[in-house]
Amino acid sequence: MTDIVDKAPTSVPPEQIKAIPVRHYGRWVAGAVVIAILVLIGIAFSNADINYGIIPDYVTDGTILSGAWHTLYISVLAMLLGLVLGVILAVMRMSSNPVTSTVAWFYVWFFRGTPVLVQLLIWYNLALVFPVLNLGFYKDEMNQVMTPFLAALLGLGLNEAAYMSEIVRAGIQSVDEGQTEASHALGMTQSKTLRRVILPQAMRVIVPPTGNEYINMLKTSSLAYVVQFNELIKRAQDISSTSLAVVEMYFVASIWYLMLTSVFSVGQYYLERRYARGSSRSLPPTPLQRLRKNLRLFGSFRRPGVAR
């Protein structure tokens, strides 16, 4: 018995598997094509009749700074107006009252179906329809009342309300109906349930698209130049009409739009990250963490751990 055991073959450990990464030559080709296109675009702009030297001077010009400030505060005010009206319209849309729900639906249908530019022009030329504004306690000519600022605020804010109402409605409907039933069982009224139970839970769904809408509002506010509101594009055009630096002023305006949207994009990201707590097991990476990851992967066109 002992001899049999001694003559048994010894087990040989398996050879360690060496994974060879798959080479993706298509990535190198795609990267080369993209770089070539970027080089051609750079050459085209470098040979263009554009005075790039004056762009840094005009970025901090007082007229441009004034336009950037007007762009910022008209966007904030229009967004606040759209948010307040959007909540009201969302509640009306979900109401069991057929009159209020129909009015809210018609509002959303009209303002989402017509261009913002047309709405701005209608508000600015409202004196053609109502020459005099008579509210009983206040009477004045519409041309005096409908200033460029008011036309821009109403045109942008009322249009935004239609989109915000759909965002708020989607957020409210994302909350389980059992929350409403439990609140009513505790004796809470409909309005109190909405304020204390539904809306706080719906914010996780409402906040991300709301931040995106505001960033879009910053750019959409450029349309207010057609009603002579002194926002960024209008100020840039005022300078270009005297200096003849048309493209240069558009570059200056683009730089300011990029700076504004970048700042608010970072704020939106961290706001979304805050409301994501409790709904996901792991929070999404911060922009710095994402940048570090992209830098590590930049230049590496292999997928590690994938065998041929």
Image (cartoon, rainbow, N blue to C red):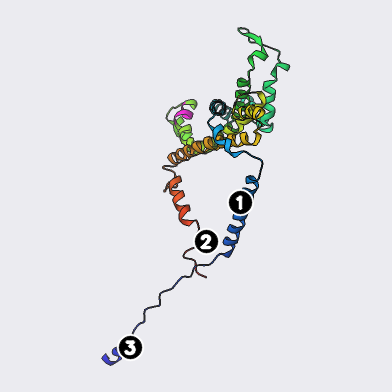
Per the rendering, the mark at residue 38 is 1
Residue at screen point 64% across, 33% down? 245
Q: Which sits in the foreground, 124 or 105?
A: 124
User: Residue 104 appears in which quarter of the rendering?
Assistant: top right
Residue 150 occupies which quadrant of the picture? Answer: top right
Identify the residue shown where x is 59% and y is 34%: 253
Callout 3, which amino acid?
Ala
Mark 3 or 1: in front is: 1
Q: Kindly identify the amino acid type of the residue bearing the numbered disc 1.
A: Leu
Q: Earlier in the sequence, mark 1 or mark 2?
A: 1
Q: Nearer the viewer, residue 240 or 209?
A: 240
Q: Outermost residue, bottom direction? A: 3
15 relative to 121 in the view: left or right: left
Please give the residue where the numbered disc 2 appears in the rendered image. Answer: 301
Q: Does the stretch in magenta take in 194?
A: yes
Label count reads 3
Amino acid type at circle 2 is: Phe
Which element carries disc 2, helix, strand or loop?
loop
Residue 209: image location, x then y, percent: 54, 38
Mark sitting earlier along the chain (2/3)? 3
Picture quarter containing residue 161?
top right
Whether tag 2 and tag 3 are in contact, CB under 8 A, the answer is no
Compare residues 264 and 85 and report the one nearer the observer.
264
Does any portion of residue 215 appear in the rendered image?
no
Stretch of the chain drawn in magenta: 192-196
Q: Residues within 10 Å of mark 1 (few under 14, many from 20)?
A: few
Query: Few, some or many C-alpha atoms within 10 Å of disc 3 (few <14, some 14-19, many ≥20)?
Result: few
